[in-house]
Amino acid sequence: MKSQDIAIVGILLAVGAIARLIATALVPSPIVPNFVIIFYCLAIMLIAPRFKEALGIGIVGGIISALISHSLFPPANLISEPLGAIVCLAVFLATKERIKFAPALSTLVATVVSGLVFVAIVMILVMIAPGMLYKAFTATSLYAFFSLMMVTIVLPTAILNTVVAQILYIPAARVLSRGRA
């Protein structure tokens, strides 16, 4: 990556972290846009990095998310965000020439994948792995927990992220194209 691209990624991730902290402080709800995901998706869509660079952006996003998360198991971000970043890159590269709302679609799919992986990790490491919880949770209750998390937290967050990313992408792309001309 060029130094200008690294600066863009750093600024966007910092803005995402600050926006997430402010949003969670002002709106005490589990359903607020995840600005770290929005801004790492924006960074990926604006600079179109290579695979390993997108992975690196996701790792940094995962570290930031883990540090500022109020979730049940913050370290799960260290896996879910890099996967979300890779998915964002793949979807965006596959759709940017064919779909007008490629930024929205890329962010939606990246957020859903990140959330799905996060919930799966929480279920495996927190609810299932300790062994004693096998007795407390049945397959039905685990499925109900997974479904509840996906429907009440992941999907609404994905929808909010999608709208915000699409709105921010257009002016950000214009500003970036002016700076590179």
Image (cartoon, grey):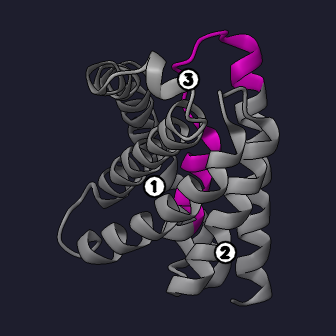
Q: Is residue 173 visible?
A: yes
Judge left or right: residue 94 versus residue 7.
Answer: left
The 10 Å Cα crowd at callout 3, few under 14, some 14 to 19, many 20 or more, is some
Amino acid marked by disc 3: Val
Marks 1 and 2, how far apart at CA: 24 Å
Res 132 quadrant in image: top right
Total numbered labels placed on residues in the image: 3
In the rendered image, which residue does mark 1 sit on?
170
Residue 19, given in percent of the width and then of the height, sits at 73, 34
Q: Which residues are magenta?
A: 22-43
Percent across and percent down for residue 155 are 35, 30
- The mark closer to the camera, 3 or 1, is 3
Q: Which label is found at residue 32?
A: 3
- Upstream in sequence: badge 3 or badge 1: 3
Circle nearer the viewer, 1 or 2 = 2
Q: Main secondary structure of the magenta part?
A: helix
Tag 2: Cα neighbours inside 10 Å, few (<14), some, or many (≥20)? some
Horizontal placement of 164 versus 162: left or right?
Answer: right
In the figure, residue 59 lies in which quadrant?
Answer: bottom right
Residue placed at 20% from the left, 63% from the top? 99
At mark 3, the secondary structure is loop
Q: With respect to residue 42, does 25 lie above or below?
A: above
SS at badge 1: helix
Instruction: State which tag comes first along the sequence, 2 or 3.
Output: 3
- In the rendered image, which residue does mark 2 sit on? 56
